[in-house]
Image (spheres, helix red, strand yellow):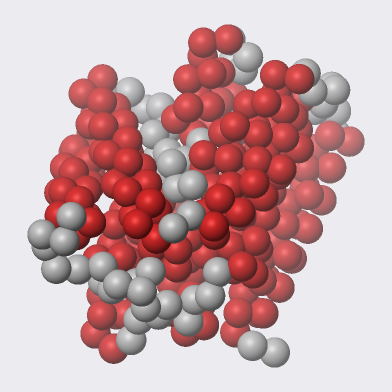
Amino acid sequence: MSAVTLVLAGLAVLVVAFIAVWMASARAGHPHGAPAPLHYAVGAVGLFFDSLGIGNFAPTTAVFRLTRMVKDELIPGTLNVSSSIPVAVEAFAFIAVITVDATTLVSMVVVGAVGGWIGARIVSRLPRRPIQIGMGTALFVGAWMMTMTNLELFPGGGDAVGLSGAVLLFALGANFFFGMVEALGIGSYAPSLILLPLLGMDPRAAFPIMMGSAAYILPSCGMKFLRTGRYDGRVALGITLGGIPGVLVAVYVVKSLPLTMLRWLVVVVVLYAAVSLLLAARSRTSAPTSDVSGT
């Protein structure tokens, strides 16, 4: 059995465990009504953009608050629970359709997941605002570097499907850090989309790596909320069911986009993330600013 197969098998086991815990929560009496059409739509749109690397936590939170769809105290749990299965579908789909070096993929996913596990227990206690400002500023710099690369005014970028040696070790350290700060609501998608292409990888290769890492982190966080009942079951179910087809459409879009257009999409995604982080830091709120608990 290959290392990639083991990663996918482990993810499948985690998803089955997540579904079992969700069913147990429902049987224990946590309310789960039939979702409304709006719930499906929020899932389809939010997870479509999540699969493009933009993330769905911030826009979905905005919808929740605008429509009063979910009580504020239930928003974090609803986000984590509703995103867990669609993000796992993202990981399976991207790994299936986009070629990535097995060593790079497996090591990055494992290190990112471990970083998320540690971050949930340690980094979540750190001050959020300075890290948001630092990450937001770094993403602006990264977006500028990617823009210069796209305009062929700055060296960088490439079409490699894997990393090796010191470059891989550097990427592993960075992905470990990205996983840790997800505990602060700072997503790993945008920094991954900047880092890996600038290290010489095809931007498409970033998607299986970052989705795979998130797919391990989200169900682990989601099960905590399921056991405590701090989530809206009706909304979470609708977003989950609506999000899966949204993910599959986005995977096709990413796979079929010309490389030049994809690189410009990366710039847009990273600028969006940078602005979101800096605005969140300015407002000093604790609302999630990304797609991962994490997605």
The answer to whether residue 227 is seen in the rendering is no
Q: Nearer the viewer, residue 74 or 272?
A: 272
In this picture, residue 68 sits left or right of residue 147: right
In this picture, residue 206 sits left or right of residue 51: left
* Quarter occupied by residue 128: top left
Q: Give the farthest residue toward the right.
A: 27
- Residue occupying image coordinates x 37% and y 78%: 160
Q: Position of residue 178 (x, y in %)?
A: 35, 57
Q: Nearer the viewer, residue 54 or 27?
A: 54
The answer to whether residue 47 is seen in the rendering is yes
In this picture, residue 244 sits left or right of residue 159: right
- Residue occupying image coordinates x 53% and y 18%: 63
Q: Nearer the viewer, residue 267 or 75?
A: 267
Q: Position of residue 137 (x, y in %)?
A: 16, 42
* 1 is higher (above) or lower (below) than 280: below
Q: Position of residue 58 (x, y in %)?
A: 44, 30
* 105 is higher (above) or lower (below) than 291: below
Q: How many numbered marks appear?
A: 0
- Residue occupying image coordinates x 85% and y 22%: 34
- Residue occupying image coordinates x 51% and y 10%: 66
